Image (cartoon, helix red, strand yellow):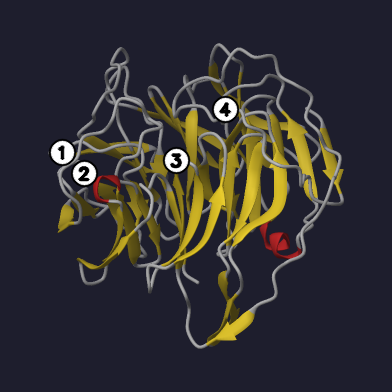
Amino acid sequence: MKIRRVPVLLATLVALASSSCATSEPGSDPGSEPAAEPSTDPTGTAEPAAGTEVAAATPRLAVTHDGGVMVVDVRTGEVLAEEALEGYARVSPAGDGRHALVSTTGGWEVLDLGAWTDEHGDHGHHWTSPAGLTGLRFEATEPGHVVAHDGLTTLFDDGTGTITSFDTTELTSGSPEVTTTSTDEAHHGVAVRLANGNLLTTDGDEESRSGVRLLGPSGTVMAETDACPGVHGEAFAGEVAVLGCEDGAVVVDGRRITKVTSPDAYGRIGNQAGSEVSPILLGDYKTDADAELERPTRVSLIDTRTAEVRLVDLGTSYSFRSLGRGPDGEALVLGTDGALRVIDPRTGEVQRSIDVVARWKEPLDWQQPRPTLHVVGSTAYVTEPRSDRVHVVDLDRGRVTSSLDLPHTPDEVVATAG
């Protein structure tokens, strides 16, 4: 594995190509195109937008749709920016409470939502600036998972196996220093650079993937396992990482990797939601390896302290975009019955059910819009593609407080607290 540090941003200011996005379907392997050598030559930086101090935080949303991405003011519903993009676009939090990364043709574009807060101990200063794409791009053949953890952001290119990481706070300057690493084989994977310099990454190839490796700063293997068939997804319970497998999960705590075994021979956990304040991870749970599309009704709760899994029957199905966590570690699941369930992760008890959207059915094509959940603090945002709306849910009060009409049918959503 080769590690390279580049003192300026891996970015490009060229216009987007017209071919469609190559982001892999959740749980699928990348295509059969040969892996290309990644580009690491800097071709430009962006000037950070100047901020204007305002009296209060201004939460905003980045919402993808067929044709691009828009930035929406949560308080007014006003569309502050419209950016056209070719192909299928996805959006992920960059990790700094201000930017998002939009995966599209050729890589990840940096989107500035234009609202943030500088904390100063017992108070904060709130700022706004013009929203929109910054012009910076992290190049990738098949942009895949984005992981923000411990002040670092890590990107995984499914098409080449290239892993790019950088200090998240440096996005504001427009020119963060990046570290690039490549796996032995390209695959549909995920990686995260840790604050101590170690790298946690999946291992596989175009045909299969079952490996998880923890590497030191120089690339030395510190711990590894090959006992995670179909490894997919990642989330943290505090400082403990969990990656899903087709027969359970693996827990990575320091240099120790522990297997969590599903109660079913095929018990796939492929999408997870973690919390900084809970040692218990929320995951999906599927048991039909041959299903064209399984619509599961149970979720998994993985206790990272004991490597034990508890299954919770919801009485309704959900999708891979239905999982979230509340401010106190509550497990949140948006069901196809339209209700957002609040689950105590310690007991598996459904404590509350909040009606949010109309009943819906998960589409066969994973790229088709469906109600999607994103949580920031004590506020949950839920899209409703059927009505071209996004609903704002106050988790403390247990109800929808506002609904925003959108000019496009929403797909994925990322929120910032402003």
- Discs 3/1, front: 3
- Do tag 1 and tag 2 residues touch (Cβ < 8 Å)? yes
Residue closer to the observer: 66 or 208: 66
Mark 1 is surrounded, within 10 Å at the Cα level, by few (under 14), some (14 to 19) or many (20 or more) other residues, namely some
Under tag 4, what secondary structure?
loop
The residue carrying mark 2 is 335
Number of numbered tags placed on the structure image:
4
Looking at the image, residue 236 lies above or below residue 29: below
- Left or right: residue 44 versus residue 401 is right
**Amino acid at pointer 2:** Gly
Residue closer to the observer: 109 or 208: 109
Q: Position of residue 399 (x, y in %)?
A: 20, 66
Residue at the image position 84 percent from the left and 44 percent from the top: 5
Q: Earlier in the sequence, mark 4 or mark 1?
A: 4
Q: Position of residue 285 (x, y in %)?
A: 30, 31
Q: Give the CA separation, mark 4 to mark 3.
A: 15 Å
Mark 3 is surrounded, within 10 Å at the Cα level, by few (under 14), some (14 to 19) or many (20 or more) other residues, namely some
**Amino acid at pointer 3:** Asp
Circle number at residue 217: none
Under tag 3, what secondary structure?
loop
